Amino acid sequence: MLIWDNDYSKLISYIKEQKEKPMLIADQNTYKACGKDIIKKLNKEKINYDLLILPKNAHADEKHLCKVLLNTNYNSLIVSIGSGSLTDIARYISFKLNLKFVSVPTAPSMDGYASSVAALTIEGLKTTVNAKTPEKIFANLKVLKDSPDILKKAGFGDLIGKFTALTDWKLAHILIDEPLNQEVYEEMYIACNTTLKNIRKEDFEKLLLEALIKSGELIAIVGNSRPASGAEHHIAHYLEFLGYDLFHGIKVGLATIYVIKLYEKLLNIDLDRIDKYLNYQIDVKLWKEEIKRYFPRIYKRVIEENLNKMKQFNDLSFRQSLLEKIKKNKDKIYHLAQELVNKKEEIFRAYQDINFSVNPKDWNIREEDIKTAIQYSLYIRDRFTILTLYQFLGILKNDKKLI
Ligand SMILES: [Zn+2]
């Protein structure tokens, strides 16, 4: 799907082959970065096109979706020239109008280029909807290298989050028998590791974009986002819910550090004596009140989606069998946690190398909000992660020194 195209000649040939008028979408920044060069080439080749330039940093919301819709006139192909939001807008409109869609990424900033879903902001809330996978992705390495540092940091943060996502996946495989695709797991791991090892080297942006695109492709193979998203994404989504308008990958990258710490903690729990958690009970009434408090606006849905799980966690025979499973697999669990913790130093160094601060204050995030996110973000989505395990054991609620 990914084609390296350093003078956009391959993109131009592709558009030419279509024989129908394409609709090009850029924003003011991406038009400057490479949109205008593409236009020049189209003009030179006398290829007809429509062009829409959105304001810089346009969100994928009703206003901009509508703007694109209004400007799409019998086009058969949409070419999005941009990163996160712009690609989401284009892929959603292409899906709705059944148009061909190709993407021209302008920054290695997120893992969604190859995705088949789009993250839209509808009535102020992030919503994931079905969308179109691009037929091709035409990437120009020079444009990626010249992209703003903050976007590269975001892409790197999103990618580093795959280390914890993969660990959560394996944990769920061990403890609740969730299917694990070993090949996908390894492919994702290797792509992340290779990028990590090449930070600040010549090929960094190339490897970063390739790994981010690969993550989208691997999601398509598995049929869900397990290989790419775990507790770190849930924490990031909760911060989003609180209204932190930072790039997605920045929040993920930051949350990843906390999830690694949670796994580090697991190494200090005596899994041989895990039985001591057998009689822990969640006070469901209190739990409902907390959900109401921490999920204003959407608490009804959150309670509805999680209530059965809380009841299951209180069921003695369920508790017994899961605790047995933990005990039986303690070596595997320690090994898994240790493997992740072994990466910690390397990840910290890489963050330092690209000036990615791991201090929430530097991103204007309150420490309190991170703590709340760690405690409550697991209810955002029904997916077993280290947060689920800690909730089951009562550690999430009762351990004041969790982070
Ligand atoms: Zn992500």
Image (cartoon, rainbow, N blue to C red):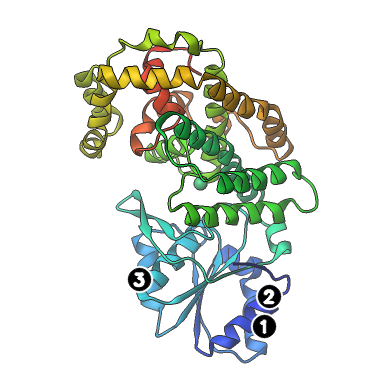
Q: In the picture shown, does residue 344 fall above or below 120?
A: above
The structure residue drawn at horizontal position 61% and vertical position 72%, both measured from the top left corner, is 35
Tell me the mark number nearer the camera, choosing from 1 and 2.
Answer: 2
Q: Earlier in the sequence, mark 3 or mark 2?
A: 2
Residue 278 x/y as whole percent = 34, 12
Q: Residue furthest right?
A: 202
Would you say the residues marked 1 and 2 are in contact, meaning their CB atoms lie under 8 Å apart? Answer: yes
Residue at the spot 35% in from the left edge and 21% down from the top edge: 321
- Quarter of the view holding residue 295: top left
Q: Which residue position is annotated with label 1?
A: 41
Mark 1 Cα-neighbour bin, 10 Å: few <14, some 14–19, many ≥20: some
Residue 96 — which label? 3
> Is 291 rendered above or below residue 279?
below
- Which kind of residue does numbered mark 3 sit on? Lys
Q: Quadrant of the N terminus?
A: bottom right
Of labels 1 and 2, earlier in sequence is 2
Q: Work out whether 98 lies above or below 368.
A: below
Which residue type carries mark 1?
A: Lys
Q: Quadrant of residue 132?
A: bottom left
Kind of residue sitting beneath label 2: Tyr
State left or right for residue 403 relative to residue 12: left
